[in-house]
Amino acid sequence: MNSKLKRITLPLLSFVTLVAMACTCAGLGAAEPTPTPEPPPTKAPTKVPPTKPVIASPTDTPEVNIGGDGDVSITIAADPFVHASGAFSIRLPEGWEIDERNYSVGAFEGGGASVQMYFDNVGVGFDAATRDKYIQSIEANFYGAYDNYQLSSQEEQQDGSIGVFKTIDLDNVPFHISTYYWQAGTVMYIQDMWIPEAQYDSYIDPLLEVANSVTVDETAGGNAALFPLRYTFTGPNGLFEFQIPYGWEYTTGSAENTMVDTFKAPDGHSYIDNLVYDDGKEISRSAAGQVALNLLKVFYADDLSVVDDQVQADGSERLSWRSNGKGIIGQTFFEVRGTTFLLLTWVVENDFYDFNQPIWADVLGSYKAP
């Protein structure tokens, strides 16, 4: 996990120039695509104290009644909620609405406060740098999509988890969010509490007890698909959409006629590029093939060799390729829709092909076009 993919990239402007030359074409005119958050079971915010208390035992007193704003009273269930997957259990507040999903559960109180628990099978044990990259991606792709996201602090907790504390606005109401990340086996566990600012002092202590009641089963969690926590990414003008892991870093760049979105795995061994080019001129199917090949050789590897070329049922074309010099394998889909040229490429280091191929297959399986 210490080896990072050294991706050889051209400055975006140079890449754009290459696209223009290859297409013999020059204003995309499309709005910049934005990741559409598909929140797991969550819809509330938080600000957490700097230190998370030591994990509490399930035998501790289950009832916690706190007075305060709005005469808040919370009773924590004596019996833990066990997720259907068996990946974790947690004692939730009694009387709160429970929303269980495939990889998470959320408990919601009518006044806006909530607590969530998620698990994400990442397939390997992360080193500290990879874990931090994963955390940064979750923060940006999920929490950062809310209004007025403000990071307060990130601190290692007494139990070894990483606490990330921030504020957001939800429906014009300020919230404090406390999120804890930790890994057990190949599973990243994520736990958060969303509390309206006006009720923070009343809710924080009992919800910390809820948070500390968690027990996990890393074997059960490791049976899940790789990176199951995903959101829907929508391309410019709604040309397409696909599912991408929350834990993968998202970057984007644009220039005249061209937009490139990149999604990179936390360990850097695999990434996906999505390119959209449109200068208002039509590109023939025969020209598109040469455009795609030129782009691949300049953008990824000059020794790139195509090992398979197949036209797909939807009219797109798939190129499977490799570069012995760079030690990478790639697969590219390209198509022309009117004046728009689309190029979707997956790149992976040779030694990490088998691990990442199922993730790429899921991305392709989720791809939708109008």
Image (cartoon, grey):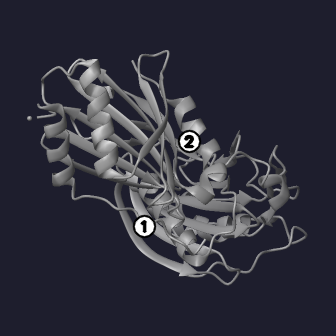
Q: Which residue is mark 2?
A: 360
The single residue placed furthest to the right in the displayed view is: 59
- Give amino acid for label 2: Trp
Position in image of residue 45 (x %, y %):
49, 57
**Percent coordinates x, y for residue 74 in the rendering:** 70, 59
Q: CA distance from mark 1 to mark 2?
A: 20 Å
The quarter of the picture where residue 240 lies is top left
Q: Which amino acid lies under the numbered mark 1 shown in the image of this protein?
A: Lys
Please tell me whether residue 360 is drawn above or below residue 210 in the rendered image. Answer: above
Q: Label 1 crowding class (10 Å Cα cut-off): few <14, some 14-19, many 20+? A: few
* Residue 176 can be seen in this image: yes
User: Would residue 8 appear left or right of 55 to someone viewing this image?
Assistant: left
Q: Is residue 237 above or below residue 6?
A: above
Residue 11 position by quadrant: bottom left
Horizontal side, residue 31 vs residue 87: left or right: left
How many numbered tags mark residues here?
2
Residue drawn 73% across the image and 62% down it: 186
The residue located at (28%, 50%) in the rendering is 298
The residue labelled by disc 1 is 6
Helix or strand or loop: what does disc 1 sit on? loop
Return the residue nearer the eye: 132 or 143: 132
Expressed as whole percent of the image width and height from the top left, the position of residue 22 reads 19, 36
